[in-house]
Image: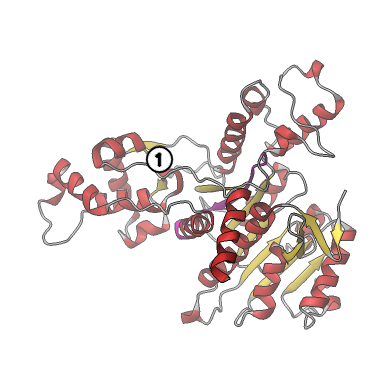
Amino acid sequence: MLKFHGDAICLSGLTGTKLKSDVIGEYYHFWWGITSGGPSKDHAYPTAIVELNAATGEVCIEDTNEIVLGSAGHALELKVNFPYTNNLKLVLIEENAECYSHLKNVIRKRWPSVSIDKAERLDELNTSNLYLLNMSLDEALKAIENLSLGNAIYFFDPLLSVKWEAIEKVASKRMINFHQTGTEFLIFLFTSDWFLGREDFAPLPITPDGDSWTDEEAETVSEADALFGGNKKWRRHILNKKPMEEKELTFVSLYKNMLYKWFRYVLPLPFNPKSDQLFHLILCSNYEDGVRATKNHYSSLTDNPVYSPSNKDAFHRFKRLHPDLFVNLSGRRRPMEWRILWSVIMNHEDGRCDRLCRDFRDIEHDTSKTQLGLKWLMERGYLESDKTMNAWNSDVRSYRLKWKVVSKRLGIEMPPQLVPLSPEQVLKNRRVEMRNAG
C-alpha cells in the first residue's frame, strides 16, 4: 500500500532512500556534464535522462519526517534550474495514477515555469524537452521510440523488481554494437526483500522443491524467474538453507553476470536503510570514467576508503620482473603493457577489459597494438580470458584481471568490498555535526 505525506511518497531510511537519491542526483550532474560535451562544447550534445518509475519527485523520510527530493526531483532540478540544459531531454514515466498526480503537483509547486500541458504531449508542440508519461513501461518505451535521445541514462526503480525483458528491450534498441557507449542503466534491487519479504511480498522459499511452496512463495519465485529472464538456474544457488547474507551476495553476483551480456562494468552500490535491510543501486556502463567517479563519490559519502594503491612501488616491481620491455625506453617513458595494466587496476570495475575500452585510446590509438598488449599481459598471467557471452556474438576478446597474480607480483591488493553506511553511523555523524555547530 502506497503512503503519501502531502505529495511526497513515504519511504524509510536516511541511509536508504535519501542516500540513494543523493547519489543519483550527483551522478546525473556528473554524467550530463560529460556527455553533453561540457563547457568547451557549450553542452550542445543531445542527452536524455529517462526515469522509468518516476514516483512523485518528492520523498518523505519516515524515520525523520523530512521531505527530500527523489531521483526524479533531482533530475527536474538539473533540467529546469541548471543553465545550458536546453539539449537535455527528461522523460519521466510513472504508471501509477496516484503517484503521477502527486508528481504533477510537485512540479507545479517546485518548478512552476514548467508547463504540465505541454510536457504531457509527445508531438512537435512540446518544445520543452521535458516529457511526462502516465502509462505502462511497455507503452512508454514504444511512445518515446521516435524521440532523438542522444546519450541516455535509464533509471529502473520499480516497487518490486525489473523484468529482464524490459532490460533487453531497452538495451537491444540502444546498443547495436559491441559494448557501445552512450547508454547507461541504473537499476534498483530490493536485495534483502527477496529473503525477508515485506507486507505484500513473501520471502523466497528455502527449498527448490516446488511442491512444498505456499502460493505466496511460488509467486515470489515467479517474480525472481522474470528478474533472471526465465532462466531458472538461479534457483539451485538461492533456494537453500545457507545464511541470508551469503545468499544476498550470491543473488547480486548472479544478477551482475546477467547484466554483463550488455555492459562491461556492473557496479552494485549497497544501501542499508535499516539494520536488517540491504538494497543495491546497480550502475551499468561501458564507460570507465563514469563508473570510477560514481564509485569514488559513493565512497566519500559512506566512509569507504577510496582505492589508491602505490603506483611507484608497483611500477618498480613490474620493471624488475620485465626488464625486456624497457630496453628501448628512456627517461620517464612507460611501456604500453604497463600503462594498460595500471589502467585496468585503477579504472576497470572487476578488472574487465577489451581492446575497445575508451581509456585505452589515450594509451594507444591503434586497437590492434592494444590487443597485442592485452595478449602479452595474458601470456604473463596478469589477465585471463573472460568467457561471458555478449549480446552481439562479437569476436572481440574480453579479459579479466587475475588479482591473485597482481597481488603476489606487484604487492597490490584488490579494492575492498563496498560497505553500506549504517543508520547508526548516520545518527552518530549527525550528533557530531550538531555538537560542532553548537
Decide: is 6 above or below 81. above
Q: Nearer the viewer, residue 64 or 213?
A: 64
Which residue: 63% across, 46% down? 272
Q: Nearer the viewer, residue 414 or 389?
A: 414
The image shows residue 288 at horizontal and vertical percentages of 45, 56
Q: Amino acid under label 1?
A: Arg
Q: Would you say residue 197 sits in the magenta stretch? A: no
The image shows residue 307 at horizontal and vertical percentages of 39, 52
Which residue: 36% across, 60% down? 361
Decide: is 320 above or below 23. above
The color scheme shown is secondary structure
- In the image, the segment drawn in magenta is 276-290
Q: Nearer the viewer, residue 162 or 336?
A: 162
Q: Would you say residue 278 sits in the magenta stretch? A: yes
Q: Is residue 123 visible?
A: no
Assign a secondary structure to mark 1: strand
The image shows residue 172 at horizontal and vertical percentages of 64, 50
Decide: is 85 above or below 411. below
The C terminus lies in which quarter of the figure?
bottom right
Circle 1 sits on which residue?
400
Q: Quadrant of residue 160?
A: top right
As drawn, is 104 to the left or to the right of 293?
right
Q: Nearer the viewer, residue 170 or 200?
A: 200
The image shows residue 255 at horizontal and vertical percentages of 61, 38
As drawn, is 164 to the left or to the right of 435?
right
Decide: is 151 above or below 421. below
Q: Is residue 56 visible?
A: yes
